[in-house]
Amino acid sequence: SFLTSLNSCFYTPNLHHFITIKLTHTNFLLWKTQLTPILNTYNLFDLVNGHEICPSPTIPSSLNSTTTVPNPNYLSWCQRDQLVLSWINASLSESILPLVIGKHTSADAWTTLNQALGSPTHTRILQLHMQLQNLKKNDSSISTYLQKAKYITDELAATGKVLSPEEFNAIIFNNLGPSFNAIVAAISTRTTPVLFPELHSLLTSEEIRLQHNTPSIDLP
């Protein structure tokens, strides 16, 4: 019921356990990925996307059709909406918070943030491409390096610029460093491109082998 849904919201765990990364000018996709499942869990996402419209503050009286009385659904809606708005505001960095000043509903705040930070621009797309091309493994672990690359790739995909597995792998291989030349050569002989999960596994195994200075193993 409406009241059950409302009560479940107020008894949710502290939000900071779920939102560990605050929204900045460069991590909109990551921030949205964190927040959306929480809103869906408590049936609140329709508030921010505008599908659950604010009810009328008053309704016709059951005793007299010419008079109105307060609408209990309006109060419930306002309480739930302000709860979500407080969650959104609490998840913003200080540099982003000014964007939602004067936004009085969760939908207004959500829409503003999507328009300001979620809409791709030519400059942003170019910036992401350059970040990916210039991303080097250096002293990072394989896992850290690949996750950084995948995050940038996901950001590009969110703008509509989807890299093929071949394109992604070529960038990764080019920036791994010479110590990974053997595994790169072995993977490159495959007739089909290696997808991210297997690529992560193969390169991590090679990293461990290199750390222990053991002979390479031929790939199947």
Image (spheres, rainbow, N blue to C red):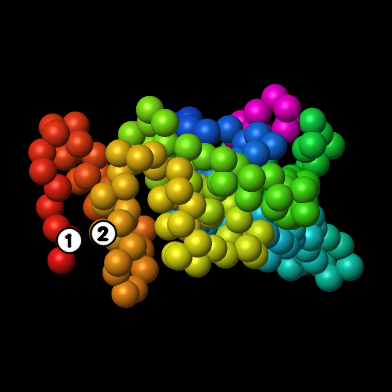
Q: Position of residue 27 (x, y in %)?
A: 60, 41
- Which quarter shows the C terminus? bottom left
Q: CA distance from mark 2 to mark 1?
A: 7 Å
The residue depicted at 17 percent of the width and 61 percent of the height is: 219
- Judged left or right of residue 189, residue 68 is right
Q: Are dots 2 and 1 in contact, CB under 8 Å?
A: yes
Provide the residue span drawn in magenta: 88-97
In the image, residue 95 lies in the stretch drawn in magenta: yes
As drawn, the residue found furthest toward the right would be: 66
Element type at mark 1: loop
Q: Is residue 150 above or below residue 88?
A: below
Dot 1 amino acid type: Leu
Q: Which label number is shown at residue 145?
A: none
The amino acid on which the numbered mark 2 sits, given as a three-letter code, is Ala
Q: Secondary structure at mark 2?
A: helix
- Of labels 2 and 1, earlier in sequence is 2
- In the displayed structure, 32 sits above or below 40; it is above
Would you name the residue on which mark 1 appears?
Answer: 219
As rendered, which of 141 and 173 lies closer to the eye? 173
Place of residue 65 in the rendered image (x, y in percent of width and height, measured from the top left): 83, 70
Q: Count the labels in the image.
A: 2
Q: Outermost residue toward the bottom?
A: 191
Question: Residue at coordinates 63% horizontally, 50% vertically from top-left?
Answer: 129
Identify which residue is drawn at 39% across, 39% down.
177
Instruction: Give the camera-side residue of 41 and 193.
Output: 193
Judge whether 162 appears above or below 13 on screen: below
Which residue does the numbered mark 2 point to in the structure image? 186
> Magenta stretch: residue 141 in it?
no
